[in-house]
Every structure is written in structure tokens, then in C-alpha cells.
Image (cartoon, rainbow, N blue to C red):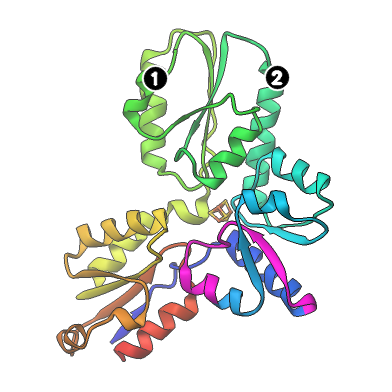
Amino acid sequence: MVTIDKESGFCFGVVTAIQKAEEELHNSGSLYCLGDIVHNGQEVDRLASMGLKTIDHQQLEQLHGVKVLLRAHGEPPSTYEKARQNDICIIDASCPVVLGLQKRIRKQYEAIRGREDCQIVIFGKPGHAEVVGLEGQTDNTAIVIEHLQDVDRLDLSKNTYLFSQTTKDVEEFARIVAEIERRFKGQEFVWKDTICRQVSGRSRHIQDFARQNDVVFFVGGKKSSNGKVLFQLCKQANPLSFFISGPEEITDEQIRACKGKAVGICGATSTPLWLMQKCKERLS
Ligand code: SF4
């Protein structure tokens, strides 16, 4: 029997961004998107065949008078400013949860702007699009930390305001908070758990799912960092877990080995349901 995990696949932020893109493509047949709309090559190709053109920030500088979609990760203020200068119409598909976080960080930054004894810290992946958008709210003065040991880089005699990228790990965030509290020498340490619950529960769930099946096919894009993390968790829970980008990567030998077994198909937050369904068709 082949089962698709009900909790795998796009979060509502990505679903909404794709719907907005499809709507615009139905109306005008052409749209630019700043960065991959989702970290999944097949989904990007599907939308590209409908007329979506993916561009980077350098290419944005060269465009004038066109429509550009901002994906769910959000963008820093400089992107909106560039669009204004170039008479670009923005279709803003930034996730409302990310926009809310940007606002909170902006508010905190304005409250402490220019104070040498304060620092804003973001628990996130340096260079990740969402983090770039968050740093932009602080005129790029925020300090980004990715791991517990990065706490060593902080000056903990300063008042510290800690936020998290929406897709980071809840437990690692709690460890970082505890470590800062332990070593803190400033007057005020305020932390906000800004991790999105659309994805934070998936780690535990995906391990349960992997254990319930004899063999697991994890479907994900090669560029998806969330996919890499979730696949590792699957593998820990069930060593017979395989990472694939699509049905064509399932070998005949694997299909033979699955005969009579409980086979699970799951994926990252960037994996489209239709792709998991195609994998199921091939296995079935
Ligand atoms: S993970 Fe959460 S915050 Fe991030 S895009 Fe999805 S719904 Fe929005």
C-alpha cells in the first residue's frame, strides 16, 4: 500500500503565492517573480511553462514598467524602493506571517535606533531570502546567528532583542534563549518566538510517519534546506528512506523491493502535492 503523508507539502503562505501567480498568468500570460517562487524545480518549471519568469535582484534593476511578484519569503524595504524608482508594479505575495514579523522587528529597531547599548539578534540562516528581508528592517544592523555556538559572537552586556526566522527549529531556539539567559549581563533581554507553527510541528510528525511505513520516499527539491533537514529526520526514524526529486528517480529495483510493503511518500514544505501523487502513481 502506498500512502501520501497528509501533512507534507506547501504551507498556506506558498499556496497563496502560487495562486496569486496563477491568477496573474491567466489574465496576462506573463509575470516576473523575484527569486524561485518555491524551492522546487518541478513547480518552478510548471509555472514557467505558463509564462512566469524568475529573475534575481540584479535583473530587477534593469526592468521598468512590468509586474513583479514577491514570493512568500518577503523582501527588504530596498526592493520596494527599487520597484518604485523603476515604475514596477509589485504583486506582493509575501506571507502575512512574515510581514507581521518584519513589522515587529521594524518597531523594535525604531525603538532602539542609534543606541550603542542595544542589539537586535535574528536566529536564522545567513543569506536566506526571508532573513535578508528581516535584516532590511534594521537597516542591516541586526546580528544573524544560526547555531547555539554563535551565541559566543554576541556582546551580552548589551540589551538584546531576539527574533527567529519563521522556519527555524523550535528546540534550537529554546536552547539559544536559555544560553543567552545564562550568560546575560545587560539590563534587558527580550525574546520572541516567531517560528511559524505551519511548519514547526512537521519534524516530529514526519518521524512518526517514517516509522509507520516500511519504506519511505521523501520528495524534495535539491535546493530546499527544509527538505534536507526533514529528510535526515526521516532517515533517522527509518533507514529505508530515500530522497528523490520526482517519480523518474524511483528505480525498478526499488519498486520490486517495495512489493507487499507499506510505502510512505512525504515531502518538504516546498513539495507540491501533484508531484507526490505522480510518485504514488509510479509506485502503485
Ligand atoms: S512557513 Fe509559515 S511563515 Fe513561512 S511562508 Fe509558510 S505559512 Fe508563511
As shown in the figure, which amino acid type bears the numbered disc 1? Arg
- Residue 57 located left or right of residue 3: right
Counting residues from the N terminus, which is met first, the one under dot 2 or under dot 1?
2
Tell whether label 1 touches label 2 (CB within 8 Å).
no
Residue in view at x 59 percent, y 51 percent: 73
Residue 256 at x, y percent in the picture: 17, 89
As shown in the figure, which amino acid type bears the numbered disc 2? Ala
Q: Which disc is residue 142 wearing?
A: none
Viewer-nearest residue: 256 or 40: 40
Residue 145 at x, y percent in the picture: 43, 30
Helix, strand or loop status at disc 1: helix
Please give the range of residues in magenta: 27-45
On screen, residue 4 above or below 149:
below
- Residue 91 located left or right of residue 140: right
Q: Is mark 1 within 8 Å of ligand 1?
A: no
Q: Quadrant of the N terminus?
A: bottom left
- Tell me the quarter of the picture where residue 103 sits: top right
Residue 126 at x, y percent in the picture: 46, 38
On screen, residue 1 above or below 14:
below
Q: Which residue is mark 1?
A: 153
Residue 211 lies in the magenta-colored region: no
Viewer-nearest residue: 84 or 281: 84
- Tell me the quarter of the picture where residue 113 sits: top right
Viewer-nearest residue: 118 or 202: 118
- Tell me the quarter of the picture where residue 71 sits: bottom right
Q: Which residue is mark 2?
A: 111
Residue 35 lies in the magenta-colored region: yes
